[in-house]
Image: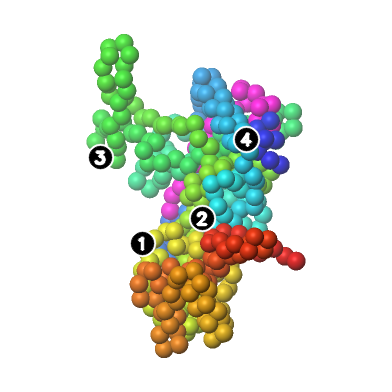
Amino acid sequence: MNLEELLNLISSTSVDDTKLFFITRALKPKMKPKARAHEKYLYHVFQVDNDEELREYIYDTSISQLKSIVDKNYEMVDYDVLNDDTENLFSYPIQNKVFSFQDVVTNQLQRDIPKIKSIRDLENDEVKLWAYCVGFEDVQTGEWVYTFRKMQASSVAIDTREANLKAKFLAWFNPESLMLQQLKGDALTLDKQIDCVFYKDIFYVIKKFNFEQMMGLQEEYAEKAKIIAEEMEETNTFSGIEKLKAVIDIKPSVHKKLVKIGMLRTYKNVTEKDIRQMKRVCKQHGDTLKIVDGKICMEEEADVDVVLKMFGDYYKQGEVSGKSYGTFSGKELKK
């Protein structure tokens, strides 16, 4: 299914059958610091009663947003860690995937969902309001389409009049008094954006960064990057792994590159012939692969960048044009 078909499906539903849900995230009790990201967190779904005006707003803006994306004619491609996310939409099936957010769509949204009585049920020192979801039900078939949006800390405002609450001051402009006044009570900001759509066990990803953040994939990639660095060290092919680990800690952009290298397994069983080939490729493109005492050496951040390029198959050549390209994205074509 493509995004236009999903848009048509949502457009065929009724405003009255539109539901608004909130998803919270909390750290599991007694969780060990080194636990995997997909094991650390609990997600819970809540619903809230809303008036007709709000239902119409979320219904109309959802359709408007999806239509604007459909009109751009983006290509739908399979999700990949290093896909170019500028001109594509991505499909992300949940089969054979292990991530704790999965329970939201496979179980919780299918059951009776508890209602909240206060925004403070969603946001406190231990629980974070993580995302909101809009559900569209086709009452004739009983099928649901869900849109998701990752919420940011600035989207939540707790009334500041009570003491000992983490809070922010929220104001609104009163058009009658022409004065800026404090908004009393708790408030949420629901913007018009959509990060992804979920239908029949597939996420259709619109905003890749937000989707990865919402699913906990970014944290998972950070963990995997450290594991790959450890495995590279164990091969005895590299020196200066400490520099690579330092870069991992300060540059999240490196995480996905190392995850891709882990998928390629190019750092396993590196031969002298492989190193000579890498040096030739580096020289051809103006890079320098440092070799010290027969090992690939990383002393500076620039050295790390070259190593990531070599083992991430960064340099590619067009078979028709013969032109060289530099990109970490792309997947192997099976012959």
The circle drawn on residue 217 is 2
Question: Is 24 one of the magenta-colored residues?
Answer: yes
Q: Nearer the viewer, residue 240 or 59?
A: 240
Q: Earlier in the sequence, mark 2 or mark 1?
A: 2
- Pointer 2 and pointer 1: residues touching (CB < 8 Å)? no
Magenta highlight range = 9-27
- The residue labelled by disc 3 is 164
Q: Nearer the viewer, residue 235 or 150?
A: 235
- Mark 3 or mark 4, which is nearer to you? 4
**Measured Cα–Cα span from mark 4 to mark 1:** 37 Å
- Mark 2 or mark 1, which is nearer to you? 1
Q: Residue at x 37, y 64 (%)?
A: 249
Three-letter amino acid code at the position of disc 2 = Leu
Three-letter amino acid code at the position of disc 1 = Ile
**Measured Cα–Cα span from mark 4 to mark 2:** 26 Å
Question: Is 104 one of the magenta-colored residues?
Answer: no
- The residue labelled by disc 4 is 70
